[in-house]
Amino acid sequence: MSFPWSPLWGLYWREIVRTFRNPFVLLITVVQPFMWLAFFGSSFSLAPSTALKGFFGASNYIQFLLPGVLSTSMLSVGMFGSMSTIQDKRFGFMKRILITPTSKGTVFLTKSLGSATRGLVQFPVMIAAAFAFGVPLDLTPLEWVAWVAALMLLAIGFCSLFLAITARSTDWQTPGVVANFITMPLMFSSAALFGSTYFPDWMKDISSVNPITFSALLGRSFVLGTGTNWADLGYLAIFSGAMLVMGYFVSSRWLRVE
Amino acid sequence: MNAALDGNAVVVKDLSKHYGSGERVVRALDHVSLSIPSGTVFGLLGPNGAGKTTLIKVLTGITDITGGDASVAGFDVRRESMEVRARIGWVAAEVILDDDFSARENLWFQAKLQSLKGWETRAEDLLAFFSLADRADDKVSSFSTGMRKKLEIALALLHQPTVIFMDEPTIGLDVSTRRMLWDIVTGVHKEFGVTVLLTTHYIEEADALCDRVAIIDQGHILAEGTPSELKGRIKADIVELETAESLDPVRIAALPGVQEVHAQGNGWTIRVGTADDFLPRLFATVRTDQIRRISVDKPSLETVFLEVTGRRMGQEEPIRDLRKFYAQMRRARG
């Protein structure tokens, strides 16, 4: 059987176009991480730069925070992806899709890739906002590409995880419940908001396998100009690939049509 | 591919679909067998919960089969699901379109799902056929219900399917839109030569649209044939009679052609072979000045349904009281 490029492209296009035709979704997608930078990022704005340099390794907390916020915002991308899937089930659209020669696996792949792409809309907005807050960003083209790739891998991984968990669900509330259950522990046990140096040992252990940590550290190494550990990108690729395979298997078998 | 199509677009053999297990098992379809000849409009007539939609779900591969076999367009529904799905169209009871897209974009999306090449000409033809060409680039959310239904049928036809499943396509529509849809179904069938499996609980719809009809109830096919064949099964007319004086029931029952007589006071319900033969005999027996009122009811699909199920469409329990049964028959025919 040939690879289903045609339904893959059709479904992916639908995911993207629907986002850009819904100004409210687009606005929330863009505003949410911006609020993080504006409010959370400004919380240390009056701190002495020496203290910031000592604690965060940056003279500006937003400079430290930016890669972390971009990484954590990929968590909400997964929630939106699974909400969109539940909407398709409830309005019968999933049935319309699956009465054609399109497989459940193809639907899963496009939901995952589409949601991840949608999440990356935040990237240019956040970079522009960071410039506006006076954050110096002196990255090489390779570093820009690697940063975007890392976020894309993280988003695909989380979307796949969310879609697998909610494959059987038709309840609007499920993605929110799942998000509440996994977002907080993943966010606070990562190095996204603060460095893990002062974490207790058990949190350091969690942080050391938390994919958000890898994405945040990689991005931070580009922004702060510290040494880059390219293995972080490899870890994210493994995380993303594993979630994609698991999600594909779960969806192919258990994705509910209605 | 099943070579033994024998001119049938859909073949169902001993098909069962159960939900749940043990004492709580629900037999949505119970050993159903039927064949749908290619190029016909086949109606599946039954009340809500009869198993109509379940049969469509099974035939379209949306739900698994518990037992038996089914093939669509010559392909086994279980083993060749993708082949089946490439050859079927589907029109849902509720209109399912992407409201954020235009009519043309919905067609583009359907073409992508079906992996079609060179679909554009066909799409333009369909837009013209359904009088949607002028609004092809408008968002579907601005369409009327009738236009949305037309577009949904156009989507179902885009890949030139062998069979179209229409699951209660007129439910919830007003009378004029329903009539318009009847014309469309007839037009689509004639123009595109596609086999249509239509489920409905509207008697008149099955009668008006379908070449063949199967009556389904509680997961069983109870009768199947052309509408006239089904009506012909009821080899009886119902004569309603009201007389000025009481008559001797034995005399009435003894008249040739009488199958059953029910009397209450001066009111009579008489089941006869044909009213045309019976009425001259009745008038020879009963003086016409004694007759206050007389009416004759001919068989309809609703009376067929009543006859084979013992109840009216949508009624839960069978009618055990013969008088009530005939009263229902009268209403069904009226």
Image (cartoon, rainbow, N blue to C red):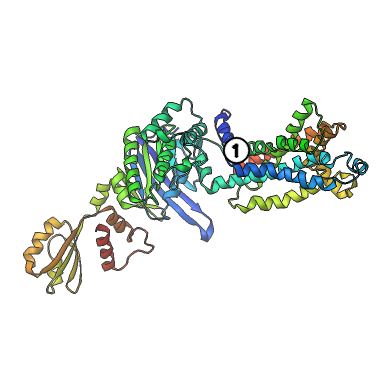
Mark 1: give few (<14), some (14-19) or many (20+) Cα within 10 Å.
few
Count of marks placed on residues: 1
Residue A166 is left or right of residue B308, and the answer is right
Q: Nearer the viewer, residue B178 or B53?
A: B178
Q: Nearer the viewer, residue A148 or A58?
A: A58
Quarter of the image containing the N terminus of chain B? top left
Q: Nearer the viewer, residue A13 or B205?
A: A13
Asked where in the image residue A140 lies, by quadrant, the reply is top right
Chain for numbered disc 1: A
Q: Residue at x 67, y 42 (%)?
A: A29
Quarter of the image containing the C terminus of chain B? bottom left
Q: Residue at x 52, y 43 (%)?
A: A93
**Residue A107 placement (x, y as % from top left):** 58, 38
**Residue B122 placement (x, y as % from top left):** 41, 28
Say what amino acid the circle numbered 1 marks. Answer: Phe
Instruction: Give the secondary structure at mark 1.
Output: helix
Residue B237 is left or right of residue B203, and the answer is left
Image height check: is B98 above or below B201?
A: above
**Residue A115 placement (x, y as % from top left):** 64, 39
Q: Residue at x 19, y 74 (%)?
A: B265
Q: Is residue A241 among the parts visible in the rendering?
A: no
**Residue B319 placement (x, y as % from top left):** 32, 65
Residue ID for mark 1: A20
Residue B101 is left or right of residue B169, and the answer is right
Image height check: is A109 above or below B170?
A: above
Q: Is residue A33 among the parts visible in the rendering?
A: yes
